[in-house]
Image (cartoon, grey):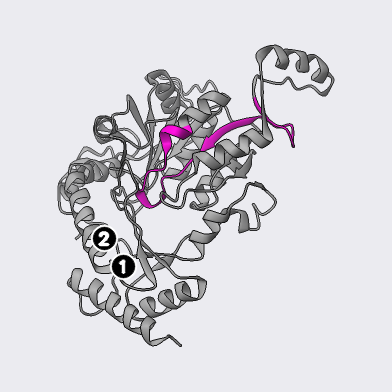
Amino acid sequence: MYSQTENTLFAETVQFIRQTFGQSEGTIPLHAPVFRGNEKKYLGECIDSTYVSSVGQFVDRFEEAMALFTGAVKAVVCVNGTNALHLALQLAGVERDEEVITQPLTFVATVNAIAYCAAHPVFVDVDSDTMGLSPTALKSWLEQNASIETAEKAEQNKGKEQGQGKARKPGTYNKNTGRRIAAVVPMHTFGHPCRIDEIAEICRQYHIELIEDAAESLGSYYKGQHTGTFGKIGVLSFNGNKILTTGGGGMLLFRDEALAKKAKHISTQAKVTHPWAFVHDEIGYNYRMPNINAALGLAQLEQIEGFLAAKRQLANAYKQFFAGKPGIKYVEEPKDCRSNFWLNAVLLDGLRQRDAFLEYTNRQGVMTRPAWELMHRLPMFNKAQCGDLSHAEWIADRLVNISSSVL
């Protein structure tokens, strides 16, 4: 089933992982949460206060602490990262039948959020080193497929289209579909920052809003700046398998205090503040994070530096172990980045080797997984526009995530 070289490599890898995690038997998970701080204390305080729902001191404290840690002006919690992405796109002005450019190598939530807005995803390739949206591919696609429409031209077209009942906005339009390109959503894959400063500059030139999917990159920095703070809005996730967990949860990061206030309003059913009356001034969402989840998150955030140090230690151990081994390459930290190493990854020689590695390790009780199925290959998105996706396809056929829990 495996060649002699593969069998040796796979067996040595399983042995190394078991030794590293100090577990000779049983299943080693891909990424397990760690609770070593004030989690039980804060949860007890939250329960004693009776404020376990969306109102309570831990919500405010968690938002303030996260804004301070990331360098954002304001942070607003949500019930999960997908809700946060949906809200971010809506706040950025994405409307029905507009387009949002993103990468095919991402978790499905990124693209589902676009669909929630009744918008259309456009898939552009990733860089091979960062595995995140490629600014080179983005610029090339826009140069070939997009045109900038000034306010004057939009006003002229508005007159032409009044019979259809829809006015055009100034901005960048897809020359093939006629739709406005409303936003770009890069994702920092497995915690490795993409070349986000270049993407931000391209978005500025083309008057397109930038929303950062930083769901996997809490504690990651690009050129000294925390991910999620380069665009109009950044999004974090605190799912159970993330570097910091609230059980389930998400957060929006803002550079604009007024926009953060708007997000808070919409995420709480757009309820007008009043001591007793229930008045709502627009369509809102029940996207509020409960206080009990925020209590867990605050306790976790207090330990983030230790988590990050442990992650880096594990990454260095993997880097040394895989160095020079035939048929496998460890995915290292890209240039100008300080990654959180949320999920460590290796690249095998090809699809057959990848599948053999996955089968062997999981059969031995060491959990591994492939990258997500590329978004343009999923049935609900397989008719979406795509650029040349050769880098994403190459990575998807070779990448495997390996055990990455905090030691």
Q: Quadrant of the C terminus?
A: bottom left
Asked if residue 309 is positioned above or below residue 67 in the image, the reply reads: below
Question: Residue 274, position in %: x, y?
Answer: 40, 18
- Asked whether disc 2 touches disc 1, contact meaning CB atoms under 8 Å apart, the reply is yes
Q: Residue at x 66, y 16 (%)?
A: 150
Amino acid carrying label 2: it is: Ser
Q: CA distance from mark 2 to mark 1?
A: 8 Å
Q: Secondary structure at mark 1?
A: loop
Q: Which residue sits at x=15%, y=53%?
A: 36
Q: Is residue 31 above or below residue 237?
A: below
Q: Which mark is residue 170?
A: none
Q: What residue do we see at 26% from left, 64% from top? A: 318
Measured from the top left, where is residue 51 in percent x and y? 28, 37
* Residue segment shown in magenta: 172-199
Q: Is residue 116 magenta?
A: no
Q: Earlier in the sequence, mark 2 or mark 1?
A: 1
Horizontally, is 120 left or right of 238 in the view? Answer: right
- Residue 190 is one of the magenta-drawn residues: yes
Foreground of the two, 89 or 389 = 389
User: Label 1 crowding class (10 Å Cα cut-off): few <14, some 14-19, many 20+?
Assistant: some
Identify the disc placed on residue 405.
2
Sort mark 2 into few (<14), some (14-19) or many (20+) by Cα contacts within 10 Å.
many
The residue sitting at the right extreme is 163
Q: Which residue is mark 1?
A: 29
Looking at the image, is 59 positioned above or below residue 217? above
